[in-house]
Amino acid sequence: MSTELEMPAELAAVAAGEAEAVARLRASLVDAAGADGLIDVAYRLVDSPVGPLLLAGTAVGLVRVAFAREGHDAVLQSLAVTVSPRILRAPARLDDAAREVEEYFAGRRRLFDLPLDLRLATGFRREVLAHLPEIGYGHTASYATVAALTSSPLAVRAVGTACARNPLPLVVPCHRVVRSDGSRGSYLGGTEAKALLLDLEAGAATCR
Amino acid sequence: MRPPFERLVEAHGAAVLRVCRALVGVQDADDVWQETFLAALRAYPSTDVLNGEAWLVTIARNKALDHHRKAGRLPLPASSQGAADGALPRGLPRGLPAGTPGGTASGGADGVAHSVEAGEDAARVWAAIGALPKKQREAVVYHHLAGLRHAEVAGLLGNSEAAARRASADGMKALREILQGTGLSDTPEGRGQ
């Protein structure tokens, strides 16, 4: 923050090596907080072909995957409100998720096998998300087709909303839902990201 | 609205570490920092925090007091009580690295002098801070090292904003004299000579 600027020059020497010390302390804080069950939301960032991804998890499971364009800070702030403000960057807690995401982008994983915490999607949105894994890797389905699987088969628009607000993109494959005219439609990770994912899956699917 | 706790660590971790180092010394500061953030995290969901930094510094100050109590020490690093009246403190030279950084200070009540890791320049500053009268020292640390406003410092010290401002200014003046090696009856280590 602004403390660096305000610190009188003759005191500046005390800041030597501070960043390293804080990094070390932060790491052991994360360990201690984890051991005491004080981390309600753990997160980490992973690089991917669709840009940096935020992975966030609770004790239940993966709770949020976010693209950079959603604003990772905004997503974390929103998790602080909707889940808990006890949020720490604790990469090790998301090792499994990070590994599966990496395998997915390498074309070596077709199915995510992770515990999920779906608390951010309720009601009909949750029902829609539950059906999305039925669209297999490398395949697509229209919003209308997905709606037909639900308890409200005419709620095509609501399916669109559920996909647009999917808290777990990639892992819950809303990118496989496309328009009835065959065009790919929008995506919360951006249309380019959606194209990349569908091409990746199509390529990896035909390679086998 | 409460920000993610991670933001508090990022924004204030360094400032809180300075406070811990000033109050219990570089060696023990890590433990106190840890206790501070763990206690803060534990309290966090139920605590509405208007000013994250002032809140954390308050916790750190309490943890430092606990630390001194446990260690059977004075509430805050000593050498201050008798030195409050302008005369520069007797305790000063032991804090200065006399070629054996940190080594000479371990027996003293003044944790500020534990400065093995901080390097000689940092050790000089910590020692000088430790040599200040208690109120001046705290005012300097909270305002200049941690960046709290005088009003917030006053809240911690239990005095008025004006008094906190004065203590901070007097503290800085004394600190400059100590660091320049002037105004001392026994000049340490030929600094500035």
Image (cartoon, coloured by chain):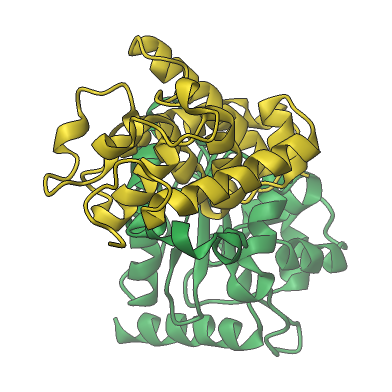
Total residue callouts? 0
Which residue is painted at 56% across and 50% down in the image?
A: B173
Left or right placement of residue B8 versus residue B34 in this view: right
Is the N terminus of chain B in the top left, top right, bottom left or bottom right quadrant? top right
Left or right placement of residue A204 versus residue A157 in this view: left
Q: Relative to A67, is A134 above or below?
A: above
Q: In which quarter of the image is residue B127?
A: top left
State the residue in front, B10 or B127.
B127
Which residue is painted at 47% across and 17% down in the image?
A: B75
Q: Relative to B33, is A19 above or below?
A: below
State the residue in front, A192 or B95.
B95
* Chain identifier matching the yellow colour in the rendered picture: B
Q: Which residue lies furthest to the front in this view?
A: B185
Is the C terminus of chain B in the top left, top right, bottom left or bottom right quadrant? bottom left
Left or right placement of residue A134 versus residue A79 in this view: left
Q: Relative to B40, is B124 above or below?
A: below
Q: Position of residue B115 (x, y in %)?
A: 26, 42
**Is residue A119 something one can see in this rendering?**
no
Q: Chain A is drawn in which colour?
A: green
